[in-house]
Image: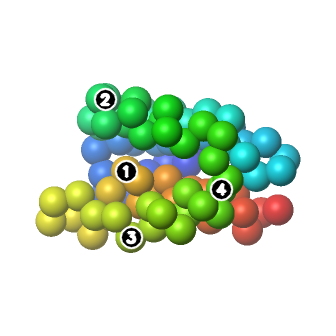
Amino acid sequence: MVYKTSGVCCTEIHIDIEDNGIIKSVQFHKGCAGNASGLSRLLVGMKVDDVIERLMGTTCGNKATSCPDQLAKALMKWRSSK
């Protein structure tokens, strides 16, 4: 799935999720390359629900959201479509 972000430096997140809700890959486009790459590696093999629980509500500086929060929102959208 491709999720268009809002309010953060990265412009979109590409997520590949297995039918059983396990994350296969995550790619952030633009934004903080090192942080995004590290986060992407940590998420492989995790359950969608666990990632949502851990990342939802994460902020970046004075912003009301962050790349991890946007990822959680994308995963919630994916989950609601199942």
Label placed on residue 48: 4
Label 3 CA crowd tier, 10 Å (few <14, some 14–19, many 20+): some
Which of the labelled discs sits on residue 33, or is there none? 2
Q: Is residue 39 left or right of residue 25?
A: left
In-front residue for pair 16/53: 53
Q: Which mark is residue 57?
A: 3
Residue 29 bears which disc, if any?
none
State the CA–CA distance, disc 3 to disc 4. 15 Å
x 27%, y 69%: residue: 64
Pointers 3 and 4 in contact (C-beta within 8 Å): no
Instruction: Determine the secondary structure under disc 1.
Output: helix
Q: Mark 3 is on which residue type?
A: Gly
Name the residue tied to disc 1. Answer: 67
Q: CA distance from mark 2 to mark 1?
A: 11 Å
Secondary structure at numbered mark 2: helix
State the image quarter where residue 43 is shown: top right
- The amino acid pointed to by label 4 is Val
Spot occupied by residue 81 in the image (x, y as percentages of width and height): 77, 63
Q: Nearer the viewer, mark 1 or mark 4?
A: 4
**Secondary element at tag 3:** loop
Residue shown at the point (40%, 30%) measured from the top left: 37
In this view, the residue in front, 82 or 49, is: 49
Between disc 2 and disc 1, whose residue precedes?
2
Whether residues under marks 1 and 4 lie with C-beta atoms below 8 angstroms apart, the answer is no
Tell me which residue sits at (28%, 44%) in the image: 9
Residue 61 visible within the image? yes
The answer to whether any part of residue 1 appears in the image is no
First reached walking from the N terminus: tag 2 or tag 3: 2
